[in-house]
Image (cartoon, helix red, strand yellow):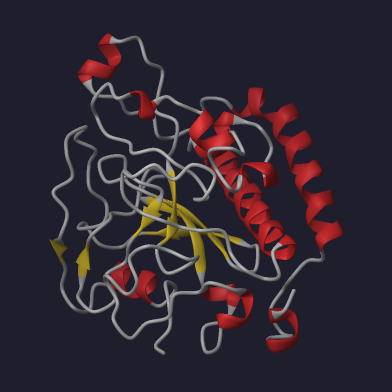
Amino acid sequence: MNWRNRNPSADAFTRVEFLVTLAALALLAAVTRPVWAGATVSRDLVCMDNHRRLVAGWLLFADDNQGRFVANLHGTIPLTGTNWAQGWLDWTTSPANTNTALLLDPRQAALAAYLPPTPSLFKCPADVYLSRSQVARGWLGRVRSYAMNGNVGPGNAKELFGPGYTIFEKTTDFRTLPPSRAFVFIEEHPDSVNDPCFFVNLTQARWIDLPASLHEGAAWFSFADGHVERRQWESPRTVVPVSTGPFTGLITLEPDNPDYLWLKARASERK
């Protein structure tokens, strides 16, 4: 991939290595998930595995498309076959909350062809939350817990929350921020997750979209070089209880909030 010559110190894989890794992870997940079920450590491992497979598919897409990343659009408009995934999640009984085709059907989701056809891939096992109306319908869960960094991939909100910051649309766009420090996928808070895009306000210390904290106050991230990290949050303004109600957004933070600064430093770079 193009950035391997630009940043030789960053870890990277060849296409063949990614295909082998995907197959091995799929087999490992199939064998071990029944053993993992229900335990705190197992939920961490499953979520980590989901991130590894999502970002591996994301990298394969770029490899097949001359280094260009899959689209990462926001909003409720139909995005059939264009966006990496579709579907607006909320606490109502809207069909989008349970429609796995919006994630797994290549005619609906551009990244589907590069991922295993496994619905649980998009769902953190610690995300068990449903509203009362959803429980009354007999639902077992909503379909997605993950979102993509709004500064990664061609989008429809250029610099909406970060004028002067880069939108990474292809592998050669990384200059001062190496792929090993640019996050791609994030677990989003169940109250906050709606479209598949996650925004970080790069000019003001505010949560627009809220990171999840479902792993004992921590969340998993995957990065543009293919590795995965667990972030233990430090601020109570990040570790927010799930209300199963609308997320009001715009949680103002202190300028030196360590969680905000950590995420901002990994979301984009100045132009």
Q: Relative to the observer, which residue lies in front, 197 or 265?
A: 197
Q: Relative to the observer, which residue lies in front, 51 or 154?
A: 154
Q: Dividing the image into 4 quarters, which one contains the N terminus?
A: bottom right
Residue 225 coordinates in the image, percent (x, y): 64, 69
Side of 120 relative to 211 (left or right): right
Residue 116 coordinates in the image, percent (x, y): 69, 37
> Up-down: is 5 above or below 222?
below
Q: Residue at x 24, y 72 (%)?
A: 257
> Up-down: is 171 above or below 113?
below
Q: Residue at x 72, y 79 (%)?
A: 2
Q: How many numbered marks does the figure carry?
A: 0
Q: Residue at x 31, y 44 (%)?
A: 76
Q: Tell me if I can see residue 182 in this picture.
A: yes
Q: Relative to the observer, which residue lies in front, 271 or 156?
A: 156
Q: Dividing the image into 4 quarters, which one contains the C terminus?
A: bottom left
Side of 200 relative to 196 (left or right): left
> Up-down: is 153 above or below 18?
below
Residue 49 coordinates in the image, percent (x, y): 63, 45
Residue 176 coordinates in the image, percent (x, y): 52, 89
The quarter of the displayed image where residue 236 is located:
bottom left
Side of 92 relative to 151 (left or right): left
The quarter of the displayed image where residue 14 is located:
bottom right
Q: Relative to the observer, which residue lies in front, 66 or 52?
A: 66
Q: Residue at x 42, y 69 (%)?
A: 151
Q: Tell me if I can see residue 40 in this picture.
A: no
